[in-house]
Amino acid sequence: MKIGGRLNLLIMVPLLALIASAAVGYLALQRSSVRGDEYKALKMAQDLKADTAPPPANLLEAWANVNQVAVIASADGWTADSHAEIDEHMAVIEAARARFDSAMAYWAGQSLDPRVQARLVEIGGDIGDKFFADIDTQIKPAIAAEDTAALLAAVRGMEWRFDVQQTGVDR
């Protein structure tokens, strides 16, 4: 090979490598950028999860299950089947309590805006703790005694705690 051919080869190989590298970089950037398909799919999955899962720092799931327990106890009375359903709902409430406590511990360690800190963590956390304490001191004993009136009274008495905690979450 002549010197001119070797020189052309010496120029062409790095130039082709540079073009290939730029093409691979462009494709990688398109996939991972905010406008890329990968990011859009990830964002859509994140939004879907946020829209369908109850937030852990919220009493909504526990409150819904407390109300289900009240409906089951008042509609079916205290049959073996209703006790089984109530036990299932109480297990969901305990899981919601664990998620709530974990979320409150997490957010208590974050540097939030003072108003958010007061509403969500301090007031909302305290109300949530009292809400779950009411479950332990009022709901569970009423279930154990099969006392529908006491159960319904306890649920009615807990509603304001849920409402107060919701105002902190909604803001």
Image (cartoon, helix red, strand yellow):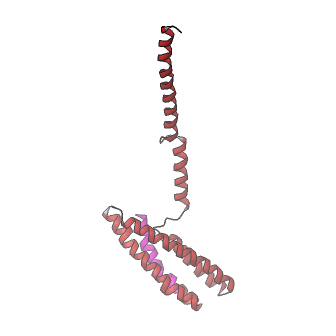
15 over 164 or under it: above or below: above
Of the 4 image quadrants, the one containing the C terminus is bottom left
Hey, which quadrant is residue 152 in on the image?
A: bottom right
Residue found at x 57% / y 87%: 143
Span of residues in magenta: 152-171
Viewer-nearest residue: 97 or 53: 97
Magenta span contains residue 104: no
Q: Residue at x 64, y 79 (%)?
A: 85
Q: Residue furthest front?
A: 1
92 left or right of 110?
A: right
Q: Position of residue 9 (x, y in %)?
A: 51, 15
Q: Give me the residue at 54% from left, 50% from top.
A: 44
Seen from this angle, which residue lies furthest left? 114
> Residue 156: within the magenta?
yes
Q: Main secondary structure of the magenta part?
A: helix
- Choose between 58 and 91: the one closer to the eye: 91
**Above or below, comparing residue 156 to residue 1 in the picture:** below
Number of callouts: 0
For the N terminus, which image quadrant? top right
Looking at the picture, how far across and down is residue 95, in whole percent?
A: 53, 73
Residue 74: x percent and y percent? Answer: 62, 84
